[in-house]
Amino acid sequence: DATANLWVGANGGGLRRVHRQALRNLTTADGLPSDDVVSLLEERPDRVWVGAYRGGAVCWNGERFEHLAGLPGPGAIVYSLALDHDRSVLLGTPESQLWRWREGSPPEVRNLPSEGSRVILRDRSGALWLGSKYGGVIRERDGVTHRFSTTNGLAHGYVTALAETSDGALWVGTKAGLHRIIGDTVSGETDGSPDALLRALHRDRRNRIVVG
């Protein structure tokens, strides 16, 4: 994050914050609604968003977790968190809904043309990308929706991660490996093996894609 913390969400282990050589583990004992963390987002230096499995969305303000009124709460799953161009926060749920939160405004929610948004990305051109469970990737641009799936290039429809490089390429992690989308063309960057499950993608400062 902006203050050199490394945040790690664990399945059943809560949220871990590493600063230099110091480790702090934040769990339900600290107010986290669930120890199954599925998404993370730094909105600003003093606020980190956490999406929890069956725990909804909460924010860490440096001292405690807080739930913001009107957003998915206990019992909800927030699979994806993303920061939009206007600094609003986007939240994706398995119910094919996209939530938008802005400071000082009531949350907005709309239905999505996909099977739950597991990952969200707003690219540099303004297009919104939604990675779904079994439905592939949906791109919304200038009011036009286009789906990339197993029928036009993806090896698997279960999308787990998205990242954009400086050349405008969209990288897609799936349950069957890594793909790259340029324009409307999909290319496979791995062999499509069914055990090539990717959990995370990150573009580093040298424009390289780091795969987890």
Image (cartoon, grey):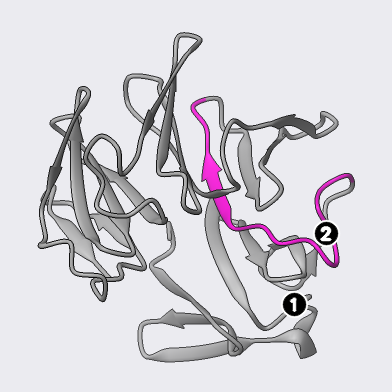
Badge 1 amino acid: Leu
Badge 2 amino acid: His
So how many labels did they put on this image? Answer: 2
Q: Nearer the viewer, residue 2 or 43?
A: 43
Residue at the location (83% across, 59% down)? 67
* 19 sits left or right of 36 in the view: left
Q: Which of pointers 2 and 1 lies earlier in the amino acid sequence?
A: 1
Q: Position of residue 6 (x, y in %)?
A: 41, 73
Find disc 1 in the rendering and name its residue.
Answer: 32
Find disc 2 in the rendering and name its residue.
Answer: 67
* 7 sits left or right of 26 in the view: left
Q: Is residue 162 above or below residue 35?
A: above
Mark 1 neighbour density, 10 Å: few (under 14) some (14–19) many (20 or more)? many
Q: Position of residue 49 (x, y in %)?
A: 63, 58
Q: Position of residue 106 (x, y in %)?
A: 85, 31
Q: Is residue 71 magenta?
A: yes
Q: Is residue 53 above or below residue 30?
A: above
The stretch of residues the image draws in magenta is 70-85
Q: Secondary structure at mark 2?
A: loop
Instruction: Classify the position of the C terminus by image quarter.
Output: bottom left
Observer able to see residue 138: yes
Is most of the magenta stretch helix, strand or loop? Answer: loop
- For the residues labelled 2 and 1, the Cα–Cα distance comes to 10 Å
- The residue furthest right is 69
Q: Secondary structure at mark 1?
A: loop
Mark 2 neighbour density, 10 Å: few (under 14) some (14–19) many (20 or more)? some
Residue at the location (45% across, 9% down)? 142
